[in-house]
Image: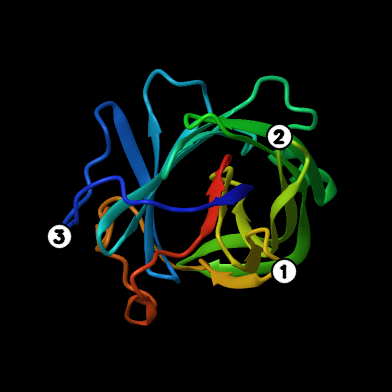
């Protein structure tokens, strides 16, 4: 499960080539998705078992990093701001519960380095549908989450579908919509289109391939994983 935030570029514009994971880290899959996004999922030495990272890249380079634990619980992210999961979530995200019962609720809060914070509450539910991409079976989920500011005012909502890979213990984007607090729903689709694994063509590629011609100057607003 992930959550939506505004995205901002973290690096200088990239040229077509190969992305290099941070020292001590190893990527295990590259995901080419709709909405002109390519993502690399990777794990790092010295972190708790099951922890993993994802970097999202657009045509101009890296714009978002997210860090999750073995239960898909979002721990931290870097984009427009740095976000950290607050200690003692009321209802932590839990992939094990989702796979066992078909439903996982969550209620947690985050703090940002700009001094703001939010509370998120909602659910992920398995729909029973499966999608196979490049031999990888993904389970479709239904999601519905509401974001509140520290005063308890609703400032955003996300709903729609995503995908989960039980073996990777990771969520991937899907088709849905996001309300940024103004009551206007923005359609979004970051569904995966193809995967590339170590040794295959396209692995660690820096340039996204799908829907790029349709984009304007702004990047899509999408949900950051705290599983992911």
Within-10-Å neighbours for mark 3: few <14, some 14–19, many 20+: few
For marks 3 and 1, give the CA distance.
37 Å
Judged by depth in the image, the label closer to the viewer, 2 or 3, is 2
* Mark sitting on residue 150: 2
Task: State the residue in front, 116 or 18.
Answer: 116
Secondary structure at badge 3 equals loop
Residue 61: x %, y % from top left: 26, 55
Please tell me in which quadrant of the rendered image residue 202 appears.
Answer: bottom left
Q: Quadrant of the C terminus?
A: top right
Dot 1 surroundings within 10 Å: few (below 14), some, or many (20 or more)?
A: few
The numbered mark, 2 or 3, whose residue comes first in the sequence reads 3
Upstream in the sequence, badge 2 or badge 1?
1
Q: Identify the mark at residue 15; answer none if there is no mark.
A: 3
Q: CA distance from mark 2 to mark 1?
A: 36 Å
Secondary element at image label 1: strand
Q: Residue 113: x and y, percent?
A: 47, 29
Tell me what residue is drawn at x 54 percent, y 70 percent: 189
């Amino acid at each position: 499960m992930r959550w939506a935030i505004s995205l901002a570029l973290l690096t200088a514009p990239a040229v077509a080539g190969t992305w290099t994971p941070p020292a001590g880290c190893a990527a295990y899959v590259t995901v080419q998705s709709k909405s002109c996004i390519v993502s690399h999922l990777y794990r790092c030495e010295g972190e708790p078992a099951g922890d993993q990272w994802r970097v999202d890249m657009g045509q101009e380079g890296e714009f978002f990093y997210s860090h999750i634990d073995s239960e898909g619980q979002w721990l931290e992210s870097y984009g427009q701001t740095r976000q950290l999961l607050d200690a003692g979530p009321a209802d932590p995200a839990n992939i094990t519960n989702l796979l066992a019962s078909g439903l996982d609720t969550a209620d947690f809060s985050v703090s940002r380095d700009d001094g703001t914070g939010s509370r998120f509450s909602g659910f992920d539910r398995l729909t029973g549908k499966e999608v196979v991409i490049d031999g990888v079976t993904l389970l479709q989920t239904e999601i519905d989450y509401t974001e509140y500011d520290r005063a308890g005012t609703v400032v955003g909502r996300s709903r729609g579908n995503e995908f989960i890979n039980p073996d990777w213990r990771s969520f991937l984007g899907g088709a849905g919509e996001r309300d940024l607090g103004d009551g206007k729903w923005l359609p979004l689709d970051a569904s995966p289109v193809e995967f590339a694994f170590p040794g295959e063509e396209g692995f660690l590629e820096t340039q996204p391939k799908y829907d790029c011609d349709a984009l304007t100057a702004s990047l899509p607003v999408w949900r950051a994983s705290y599983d992911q």
